[in-house]
C-alpha cells in the first residue's frame, strides 16, 4: 500500500531536518576541535617562553658578578629654568652615578633603563593657547634620533612620563623643547634595570 503524498513529504522534511541538525553538530564539533588546537598551541608557546625565561635567568644568576656591575648606574636630575627652542636643556645631576657632560646624560652600560620625567611647563603668554613638544633624544657615534616626544598643552601644563628604554653604552641622552618656555620643578630619573655590558 502506497503512502499518502503528504506523509511522504513530511517524512522527507523530517529527514532533511535531521540531516541539517547532524551537519550543524558536525560543524560545531569541527570548530571546537580547531579552537581546542589553538588553545593547545598557545599554551605550549607560553610554556616554552616561560621555560626560556627561567633558563636565561638561571644562567644569568650563575655568572660571577664583576666589580663594575655591583653598583647600579642611576641618576636623578632636578631642573627649574628656561628652555630654548632646539637647544638641549642645561641639566645637572643632583645625585647618582651617571654623569652629565655638555648637557647630555652619558650612558655607560647597555641595558634596560627605567626613565621618569615629571614637571611643569609655563608658557610665555598665558592668554594665548599654546603647546610645545618635549623631546628626549639620543646620539650615538654616528647618528641622532628621538626616543620619545610628549606634547604639553597650555590647558594642562604638567609633564608626566614613565617608560622603559633600551640604551647602549656611549649613548648620549639629551632633553629639549620645540619652543621657548619656563620649566618648573622638572624631575628626571634614569635607573638601569638590567645591565648587559658596561664600559665604565
Image: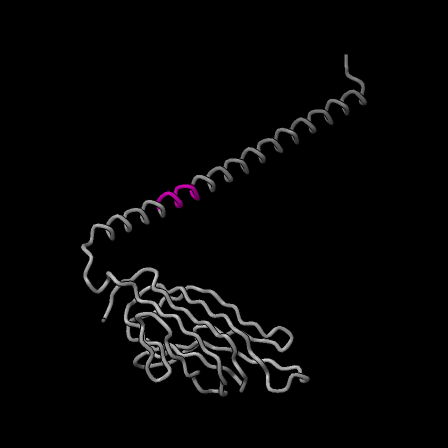
- Residue 12 position, x and y percent, is 72, 25
- The picture quadrant where one finds residue 92 is bottom left
Q: Is residue 105 above or below residue 51?
A: below
57 displayed left or right of 136:
left
**Along the viewing direction, whichever of 44 and 127 lies nearer the viewer:** 127
Residue 71 highlighted magenta (yes or no): no
Numbered label tally: 0
Residue depicted at x 37% and y 43%: 47
- Residue 57 position, x and y percent, is 29, 50
- The picture quadrant where one finds residue 156 is bottom right
Q: Looking at the image, what colour scheme do you see?
A: one colour
Quadrant location, the C terminus = bottom left
59 displayed left or right of 17:
left
- Residue 63 position, x and y percent, is 20, 54
**Along the viewing direction, whichever of 111 and 92 lies nearer the viewer:** 92
Residue depicted at x 67% and y 84%: 128
Residue depicted at x 28% and y 71%: 108
Quadrant location, the N terminus = top right
Q: Is residue 46 above or below residue 114?
A: above
Which segment did they paint magenta? 41-48
**Along the viewing direction, whichever of 51 and 157 lies nearer the viewer:** 157
Q: Is residue 34 above or below residue 66?
A: above
Which secondary structure dominates the residues rendered in magenta?
A: helix
5 displayed left or right of 182:
right
Residue 46 highlighted magenta (yes or no): yes
- Residue 60 position, x and y percent, is 25, 53
Amino acid at each position: 500500500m502506497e503512502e499518502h503524498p503528504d506523509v511522504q513529504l513530511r517524512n522527507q522534511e523530517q529527514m532533511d531536518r535531521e540531516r541539517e541538525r547532524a551537519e550543524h553538530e558536525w560543524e560545531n564539533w569541527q570548530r571546537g576541535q580547531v579552537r581546542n588546537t589553538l588553545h593547545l598551541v598557545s599554551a605550549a608557546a607560553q610554556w616554552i617562553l616561560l621555560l626560556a625565561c627561567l633558563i636565561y635567568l638561571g644562567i644569568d644568576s650563575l655568572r660571577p658578578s664583576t666589580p663594575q656591575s655591583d653598583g647600579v648606574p642611576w641618576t636623578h636630575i632636578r631642573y627649574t629654568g628656561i628652555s630654548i627652542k632646539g637647544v638641549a636643556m642645561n641639566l645637572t645631576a643632583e645625585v647618582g652615578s651617571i654623569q652629565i657632560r655638555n648637557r647630555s646624560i652619558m650612558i655607560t652600560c647597555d641595558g634596560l633603563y627605567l626613565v621618569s620625567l615629571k614637571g611643569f611647563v609655563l608658557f610665555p603668554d598665558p592668554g594665548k593657547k599654546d603647546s610645545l613638544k618635549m623631546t628626549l633624544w639620543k646620539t650615538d657615534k654616528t647618528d641622532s634620533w628621538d626616543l620619545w616626544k610628549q606634547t604639553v598643552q597650555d590647558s594642562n601644563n604638567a609633564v608626566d612620563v614613565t617608560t622603559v628604554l633600551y640604551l647602549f653604552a656611549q649613548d648620549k641622552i639629551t632633553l629639549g623643547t620645540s619652543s621657548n618656555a619656563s620649566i618648573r620643578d622638572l624631575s628626571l630619573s634614569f635607573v638601569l634595570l638590567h645591565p648587559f655590558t658596561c664600559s665604565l
